[in-house]
Amino acid sequence: MAGEPFDLARLRLNWARAAEPPADGLPARLAAVRMPRDAYPEARALLERIRGMAEAQFPQREPTLEHFFAEATALLILMESPAEGTGQAAGYRGEDASQDAEDARTRMVELLDELTELLEVFATIGR
């Protein structure tokens, strides 16, 4: 990639494909994708897989990575609480609970971006 000439025609083609959805509906391969019934257990399992892979590849970086995974786990709990009605037990009620969950989602996206960048740095500088 680094050294390849910039292909403007290919970029425009990709943007054209992304801009307009197909007129006759979704292709079969996309229509077959199913949303998990309960996304939070899926998210927890995925987070644990990522944690395991990161710790296996960068064992000496575990203290640094632990901060990110601990915060991500706490955010998942916060997002899940209002959805299950258990947010009240944690002190979240009414509109505050939904706002807390929305703030948690925003922070989770930021956190995952930071984690991605950190893992890329670790991969670049070596194990």
Image: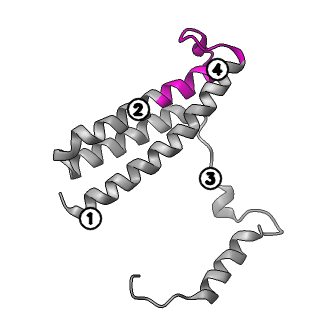
Relative vertical location of residue 88 with respect to residue 55 in this rendering, above or below: above
Relative placement, left or right, of 2 versus 34 is left
Mark 4 neighbour class, 10 Å CA radius: few under 14, some 14 to 19, many 20 or more = many
Please name the amino acid that badge 4 sits on: Ala
| Earlier residue among tags 1 and 3 | 3
Mark 1 neighbour class, 10 Å CA radius: few under 14, some 14 to 19, many 20 or more = few
Q: Are marks 1 and 3 in contact (CB under 8 Å)?
A: no
Which residue does the numbered mark 1 point to in the structure image? 124
Identify the image's colour scheme: rainbow, by chain, secondary structure or one colour: one colour
| Image coordinates for residue 124, horizontal then vertical, percent | 26, 64
Disc 4 from disc 2: Cα separation: 18 Å
**Which of the two discs, 3 and 2, sits closer to the camera?**
2
Which residue does the numbered mark 3 point to in the structure image? 33
Q: Which residues are magenta?
A: 75-94
Please name the amino acid that badge 3 sits on: Val
Q: Residue at x 32, y 42 (%)?
A: 51
Q: Which mark is residue 71?
A: 2
| Image coordinates for residue 125, horizontal then vertical, percent | 22, 62
| Earlier residue among tags 2 and 1 | 2
| Image coordinates for residue 35, horizontal then vertical, percent | 62, 44
